[in-house]
Image: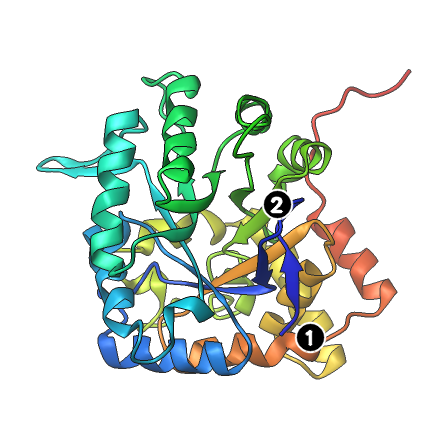
Amino acid sequence: MEQRQLGRTGLRVSQLGLGTLTWSRDTDEHEAREQLRDFVDAGGTLVDTSASYADGGAEELIGSLLGDVVAREDLVLCTKAGVRRTATGGVVDASRGGLLTSLDASLARLRTDHVDLWLVQTPDPRTPLTETVSALRLAVTSGRARYVGLSNHAGWQVARAATLLADDVGLAAVEVEYSLLQRGIEREVLPAAADLGVGVLAWSPLGRGVLTGKYRRTIPADSRAASPHLAGFVEPYLGADSLAVVEAVAIAAQGLDRSPLDVALAWLRVRGQISSAIVGARTAAQLRASLAAEDVELPPEILRALDEVSAPDLGYPERR
């Protein structure tokens, strides 16, 4: 598997990352072990998780597999902080105290003394960005994180954080949703990241599973959309607005004698600014399907057709 540079840093990550959103919840220890083994055998290195996934359960499961399935030094571990669990549900907390407390707990669950990449999971309107950035700086200078970044932040926030960190630790990455069904980051986030040398990690490159075509006719009983935990996660892409894109992907796949999943990942792979596409699979079989898509190359005419049918409204005023 190709290893790509993360922005202008010296960190290299596999062009496919292993997402763990479902681990310890819909993906048990047996399936997780098999996924990690298959991923590493295919040359994968980037494993993406979060303190909020299964209330820390995903991190605990990863920690239990380190040193057994794979050596710690063979992985690029990325985790996120900023969503704190309370008795009434999740609360966004990107304060310095909240973030650093979360990082320490993540390290304990992961059974390691540092993570390779640490991200703030979502913007916190109650905390000044300067305070959030100070936690990122301290994570690096204290040795608890090698590189830091943001997740799901707007372009101006990425630019501001990168500026605040420019003289010392630097902003390494921004992790954002990006697929043929969600190209909104092309408005501001991608241009900002390109100008500032910030690497881009794309989560949900399969449009939350919808681009696989599994939801074209019905909702499979074993799918995310049928899961009580994740139904709301998939629902936004099950409407009419997504249908034309999904059908275009399916038609292209049929013409190439490949699967819609292959086409969706191949489209993203040629976006040169994307360092890694993070695929989250519930089962090892689903992950193997993504790993098998590495050899797919889309003809220029198919790339153009997919670009056109999925083109976002960039919101620019019409020239007169």
Kindly tell me whether residue 218 is visible in this rendering: no
Which part of the image, by quadrant, shows the N terminus? Answer: bottom right
Q: Position of residue 66 (x, y in %)?
A: 31, 71
Kindly tell me whether residue 212 is visible in this rendering: yes
Where 153 falls versus 75 (above or below)? Answer: above
| Mark 2: amino acid | Gly
What is the basis of the colouring in this image?
Answer: rainbow
Residue at 68%, 38% (x, y): give it: 197
- Horizontal side of 154 relative to 192 (left or right) equals left
Which part of the image, by quadrant, shows the C terminus? Answer: top right
Residue farthest along the right direction in this orientation:
320
User: Tag 2's secondary structure?
Assistant: strand
Q: Nearer the viewer, residue 79 or 112?
A: 112
Residue farthest along the front direction in this orientation:
142
| Mark 1: amino acid | Ala
Q: Tell me the tag on residue 253.
A: 1
Q: Dot 2: few (<14), some (14–19), or many (≥20) neighbours within 10 Å?
A: many
Residue located beneath label 2 in the image: 199
Which quadrant of the view contains residue 97? Answer: top left
Where 215 falls versus 70 (above or below)? Answer: above
Where 76 falls versus 133 (above or below)? Answer: below
Residue at 28%, 53% (x, y): give it: 53
- Select label 1 or label 2 by which is in front: 2
Q: Position of residue 16 (x, y in %)?
A: 56, 66
C-alpha gap between disc 1 and disc 2: 29 Å
1 and 2 marks in contact (CB < 8 Å): no
Q: Earlier in the sequence, mark 1 or mark 2?
A: 2
User: Tag 1's secondary structure?
Assistant: helix
